[in-house]
Image (cartoon, rainbow, N blue to C red):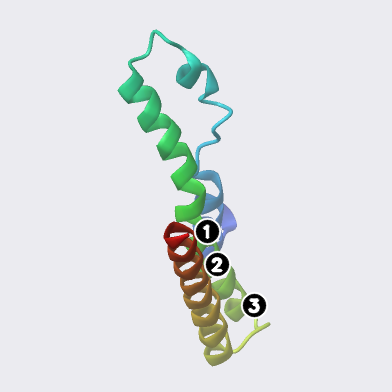
Amino acid sequence: MGLLGLEPWQAGLVGVILAPTDAALGQAVVANPGVPAVIRNALNVESGLNDGLALPFVTILVTVGLVAGGAETELRAVETLLLAIGGSTVIGLVAGLGVGWL
C-alpha cells in the first residue's frame, strides 16, 4: 500500500484523471482581450491537448489494475493494450491523413 492506502497504479490513475485542465476553468483568461493573444492561444491549445495525452496513460493504468485485481492475465492484458493503443493510433492516422488528402 502506498499513499492514502492506494496501490501505486491506483494513485497513478487518480493523478492522470485529475491532471488535464478543464478548458471551462480558463475561459475567463482565454476570452480576456487584456491577455496577449499569444498566451491566450497557447492556453487554448494546451487545454485541448491534455485530454488526448492522458488517455493512453488511463488505458495503461486500468489494464494494470485489471491484472493486479486478477481479472485479467498479464499476457491477455498486454495483447488487449497493444490492440487498443496500436489500433487507435492506426485509425487516427488513417482518418487524419485521409481527411487531409480530401
Q: In this view, does 62 lie above or below 14?
A: below
Which of discs 3 and 2 lies nearer the camera? The answer is 2
Label 2 – label 1 distance at C-alpha: 6 Å
Q: Do the residues labelled 3 and 2 touch (CB within 8 Å)?
A: no
Say what amino acid the circle numbered 1 marks.
Answer: Leu
Q: Which of marks 3 and 2 is nearer the N terminus?
A: 2
Label 3 – label 2 distance at C-alpha: 15 Å
Res. 45 mark: none
Mark 2 neighbour class, 10 Å CA radius: few under 14, some 14 to 19, many 20 or more: some
Helix, strand or loop at disc 2? helix
Res. 55 mark: 1
Which of discs 3 and 1 lies nearer the camera? The answer is 1
Q: Name the residue under label 3.
A: 69
Q: Is residue 17 above or below residue 64?
A: above
65 displayed left or right of 35: right
- Looking at this view, is 11 or 49 the one in front? 49
Which quadrant of the figure has residue 74? bottom right
Q: Do the residues labelled 2 and 1 touch (CB within 8 Å)?
A: yes
Helix, strand or loop at disc 1? helix
Helix, strand or loop at disc 3? loop
Res. 59 mark: 2
Q: Earlier in the sequence, mark 3 or mark 1?
A: 1
Relative image position of residue 59 (x, y in whole percent): 55, 67
Residue drawn at point x = 59 percent, y = 68 percent: 62
Relative image position of residue 15 (x, y in whole percent): 50, 50
Q: Are marks 3 and 1 in contact (CB under 8 Å)?
A: no
- Looking at this view, is 8 or 53 the one in front? 53
Say what amino acid the circle numbered 2 marks.
Answer: Thr
Residue drawn at point x = 49 percent, y = 58 percent: 12
Relative image position of residue 64 (x, y in whole percent): 54, 74
Figure label count: 3
Residue 7 appears in view: no
